[in-house]
Amino acid sequence: MSSPIFHLDVSVASSSYPILIGEAMDWQSCLSELTQNRQVMIVTNVTVSPLYLQKLKTALSTVQKLGVFELPDGESYKNSESYLSILDQLMTSGFNRDCVVIALGGGVVGDMAGFAAATFQRGVDFIQIPTTLLAQVDSSVGGKTGINHPLGKNMIGAFKQPKLVLIDIQTLNTLPERELSAGISEVIKYAAIADRDFFDWLEIHLDSIMALDAKTISETIYRCCQHKAQIVAEDEFEQGRRALLNFGHTFGHAIENHQGYGKWLHGEAVGAGMVQAADLSYRLGWLELSDLDRLKVLIQRSGLPVLSPIHQPELALELMQRDKKVKNGQIRLILLRSLGEAILTKDYEADALLKTLQVTSGAES
Ligand SMILES: NC(=O)c1ccc[n+]([C@@H]2O[C@H](COP(=O)([O-])OP(=O)(O)OC[C@H]3O[C@@H](n4cnc5c(N)ncnc54)[C@H](O)[C@@H]3O)[C@@H](O)[C@H]2O)c1
Ligand SMILES: [Zn+2]
């Protein structure tokens, strides 16, 4: 099979671009229009490069000039040094304003390459070829790019929409299982905040997704990208509805922070974080107990943790407040009105949150 199974368009005020989803696609035909006779810089990392760089290079046989920038692997390299090295290479290799930057890798590579593309000569074209499930369903779509600062994650960045997102699900065959689970966490997120039917569907198809059945995983990615595209189209710069994509994230960031970044994967922390947000939603009388249980079970079946490792509720609260930089007030949280419907709210009792933080930590079970 070489043609895309799904084609989706993302429309924002500034541009419109396709997401192509397929299995073992013909990368050359997908890329040629955007890259022919142009200068192309591939940004990838040392793990992904031995797996897929050759395929990409072969697909780019008609470009005018080809550069490759290979990063070390890891979130800790999503920093200003790596970013500046990409710009250095673009400068020293004589790339001009008409060049194209291609990100080949997971979210770390995508965020960094995108930020380099957003800022090199005030912005050059950018293509995403995401190779993790998390990047395919989340980070490659929507135009958020950036790097970390020693004092905070994703603190330096820009909105930069790509010209194309090319999702070849064959790349998932080499992805470690733990990374696959971390990506499924974000899949469940879309269902929980916006699509109860999708949630029902996931319960039925989870095993096929985890077994990487081509048809099921393509449809999963398509449905997630549809949601992301719609939310981004409504709210490109996160002034409203886009914030709902952070469901489970304020709780999750506290966990990541507490454990030290890198110990728990982001998707794992979000898995436990979604259970916490859902528990609070249940405590407020919004979410049915049976739906809370369904969410927990689905997260657990995905190989993700459902309990927070922070055993002191007050500490968890402090970490959450630090994450959101709240001053003497309550943190705004994304909670579920029901399964498939989320809201951003401050309208909850502080005691209820503390109770949630207590019962959802590993301490009590
Ligand atoms: N821009 C956004 O909207 C957005 C949204 C969510 C997350 N993010 C960012 O994304 C990053 C996380 O992305 P991620 O989960 O993809 O992590 P990642 O990029 O670190 O990839 C995870 C691991 O998988 C490896 N890998 C990638 N593709 C592979 C493949 N096909 N086969 C084998 N190994 C492969 C990577 O080298 C890495 O070791 C974070 O920095 C986060 O801030 C951005
Ligand atoms: Zn996330």
Image (cartoon, rainbow, N blue to C red):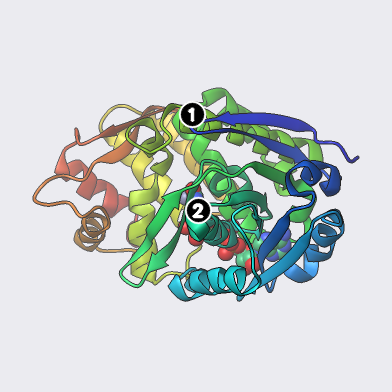
Badge 2 crowding class, 10 Å Cα cut-off, few under 14, some 14 to 19, many 20 or more, is many
Q: Quadrant of ligand 1?
A: bottom right
Position of 249 relative to 201 (above/below)? below
Give the CA distance from mark 2 to mark 1: 19 Å
Q: Position of residue 295 (x, y in %)?
A: 49, 38
Provide residue 326's location: percent of width, then percent of height: 17, 51
- Which numbered dot is residue 233? 1
Tell me which amino acid carries mark 2.
Answer: Ala
Earlier in the chain: of badge 2 and badge 1, it is 2
Residue 48 visible in the picture: no
Q: What is the secondary structure assignment of the residue under circle 1?
A: helix
Report which residue position mark 2 lands on. 118
In this rendering, position of residue 280 left or right of residue 48: left
Residue 16 rendering spot, x and y as whole percentages? 59, 31
Residue 199 visible from this viewpoint: yes
Given residues 326 and 259, the one toward you in this image is 326
Bin the neighbour count of mark 1 within 10 Å (Cα to Cα): few under 14, some 14-19, many 20 and up: some
Q: Residue at x 20, y 36 (%)?
A: 346
Task: Name the residue at 44% across, 57% down.
Answer: 269
Check the image and report above or below for 24 versus 314.
Answer: above
Q: Image height check: is 6 above or below 257? A: above
Nearest the camera: 99 or 285? 99
